[in-house]
Image (cartoon, rainbow, N blue to C red):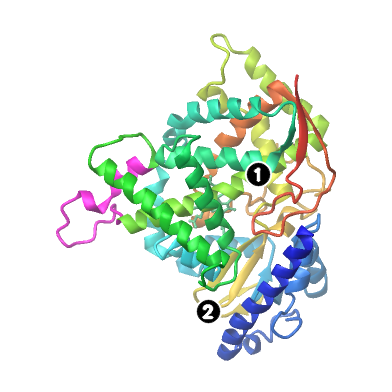
Amino acid sequence: MELSIFMITALVSILVVSVFFVFKCWFWGTPKAMEDIPGSLGWPIVGESFSFISEFSSPSGIYSFMSKRQQRYGKVFKSLVLGRFTVFMTGREASKILLTGKDGMVSLNLFYTGQQVLGPTSLLQTTGEAHKRLRRLIAEPLSVDGLKKYFHFINSLTIETLEQWPGRTVLVLEEASTFTLKVIGHMIMSLEPSGEEQEKFRANFKLISSSFASLPFKIPGTAFHRGIKARDRMYAMLDSIILKRRNGEGFQQDFLESLVTKHSKNLVETSGGEDDNKLTDKQLKDNILTLLVAGHDTTTAALTWLIKFLGENPVVLEQLRDEHIQIQRNRTNGTNLTWAEVNNMPYTAKVINETLRRATILPWFSRKAAQDFDIDGYKIKKGWSVNLDVVSIHHDPEVFPNPGKFDPSRFDGLLKPFSFLGFGSGPRMCPGINLAKLEISIFIHHLVCRYKWKALDKDDSVQPTLVRMPRNKYPIVVETL
Ligand code: HEM
C-alpha cells in the first residue's frame, strides 16, 4: 500500500517536473547539442526517469542502471532523468576533472527545491572565491581539535541511546536519525537532547528534509510549501538564539557562538567595505541549515549501513570487537572511552571506509558545467548537467576485486587517487568528515563492546531517496553481551 502510494506520487512528480524542465531545455536546444554524446534520451518528456527510479531502489541500486548503459555506450552517456538532460560519466579520470574543477569549471547542481530552501548564500550554491571563503570560516570549528569539546556529549548520548535498545524491536535507521540530529543540534546551537525545543527542531527539520524531493510548486498544502514554512520557523529560532548571544545571554561553546563572535557582521563597526571574514545573519543561517541538511541523512545512513554490514559479516564484526575490547583492556585509569582512544582506532577507520564504498551513500555527484570542456573525448557545453557515477567507481573490480564483498582490508594500503570517494574529493570534499567519523567511532565502540544483535528482516532494497538508506530501516533485536 505504502509502496503503491509512493509509486503513484513518484510517477506524477516525475511527469510534472519533467514537463516543466524539459520544455525549458528543449527551448534552449539542449538535446540537439547533445547529439554527439552516445546514449538514449528515452521517452518524450519523461525520458528514462521510470527505469532510473525503479532501479534506484533495487538492491544493486543505481549500479544496474549505470552498468547497462556503460556496457552499451561506454563511460560517457546521455540520458533524460528527473526532468534533466544529463551526461553521466564515470572513472578516475572523469572524477579528477569534475571534482578538482579547476578555474570554476563546474558548480554544484542542486534541484530547484533545494536551491529555494537552502537560500542563495548556502555553501552549496556559492562558487569560486565566495565558496573558498565560506569553507575557511567553517573549517576550524569542524576540525579534529575544534570537535574535541563535543566528545563527552556524543559519548554520553551514545551510552544513553544504546541502553534503550535491548528487549524491543529497534529500527536502526530511526534510532540513528534521532541520534545524529541530537548531536548536530547540540554541536551547532547547544540544543538540549530532549524537551520541547528538540521536538520543534526535529519536526521542522523533517519537513525541510522531505521538501527537497518534492514538486517545485510553493502552493499551500504541498511538501515544498511546508518545507519553506518549516525553514522560516527554523530561521526564527536561530534569530532568537543569535540575539541572545549578542546580548551576552546564554553563552555556549558551540558552532554558532564561534561564528557569531568571530565572523558575524553585526558585531563590527562596518565602514562600508567588505570584510572577508564576516558573515551577515542571512549567510550564517543559510549555512547552518546547509550543515544540518548535508550532515544529517548522510551520517544516519552511514551508521545504519555499518551496523547492517557488521550483522551480515561476523568475521569483520569479530575483528572489530577485538580492536575495541583491546582498547578497554589497555585502559589504566577509568572505564570510559577517552578522546585519545577514539582517535586511534585503525580497524574501525577501515570499516567506516568500506561501509562508504560498499553502500555509496551519495551514488552520484551532480555538477553543472560553468564553461565548455572536454571529457573522455566528448565536448561538454556550458550549462549542461553532468553527473559523476560514483557507484561504478566504488565497484570497479580492477581496483576493488569482488566488489560486492564487504572487506575492510581493502583499505590496508594506499589506493589509487580518485578510486574512493566516500567523502568526495577536491574543493567540495565533505567538511563534516571529522564529525561523521567521530560520531560513528564512538557509537560503534559502545555497540560492539556491550551488545550483540540479530536482524529481523532480510530485505536488501533501498529507499528511493537521494541519500541511499535501507528501505526496511534495518530492524533488529538486541541483547547485552
Ligand atoms: C558519513 C557521513 C557523511 C558522508 C558519507 C558525507 C559525504 C559527502 C560527500 C561525498 C560530499 C561531496 C559531494 C559532492 O562533491 O558533490 C559531501 C559534501 C558536503 N558535506 Fe558531507 N558527508 C557526511 C557527513 C557530513 C556532516 C556531518 C556534515 C556537516 C557537519 C557534512 C556537510 C557537508 C557539506 C556542507 C558538503 C558540501 C561541501 C561543499 O560544497 O563545499 N557532511 N559530503
Q: What is the x, y in percent for residue 356?
A: 67, 46
Q: Nearer the viewer, mark 2 or mark 1?
A: 1
Residue drawn at the location 64% of the way across and 38% of the way down: 175
Location of residue 323 (image quadrant):
top right
Query: Quick one: quadrant of the C terminus?
Result: top right
Query: Quick one: quadrant of the N terminus?
Result: bottom right
Q: Horizontal placement of 208 versus 268: left or right?
A: right
Q: Which residues are magenta?
A: 256-280
Residue drawn at the location 43% of the way across and 65% of the way down: 127
Above or below, comparing residue 172 to residue 205 in the picture: above
Above or below, comparing residue 403 to residue 167 in the picture: below
Residue drawn at the location 72% of the way across and 26% of the way down: 166
Residue in the foreground of this view, choosing between 400 and 287:
287
Residue in the foreground of this view, choosing between 401 and 189:
189
Above or below, comparing residue 266 to residue 370 in the picture: above
Q: Which mark is residue 119?
A: none
Q: What is the x, y in percent for residue 12?
A: 69, 74
Say what amino acid the circle numbered 2 marks: Lys
Residue drawn at the location 76% of the way across and 40% of the way down: 475
Q: Horizontal placement of 238 versus 375: left or right?
A: left
Single out the residue that lies furthest toward the top.
332
The residue carrying mark 1 has its beta carbon less than 8 Å from ligand 1: yes
**What's the CA distance linking mark 2 and mark 1?**
34 Å
Q: What is the x, y in percent for residue 186?
A: 46, 37
Disc 1 is placed on an element classified as helix
Residue in the foreground of this view, choosing between 150 and 459:
459
Q: What is the x, y in percent for residue 291?
A: 48, 50
On the image, numbered disc 2 is attached to which residue?
A: 382
Q: Is residue 75 visible?
A: no
Q: Is residue 274 magenta?
A: yes
Q: Residues within 10 Å of mark 2 (few under 14, many from 20)?
A: some
On the image, numbered disc 1 is attached to which residue?
A: 302
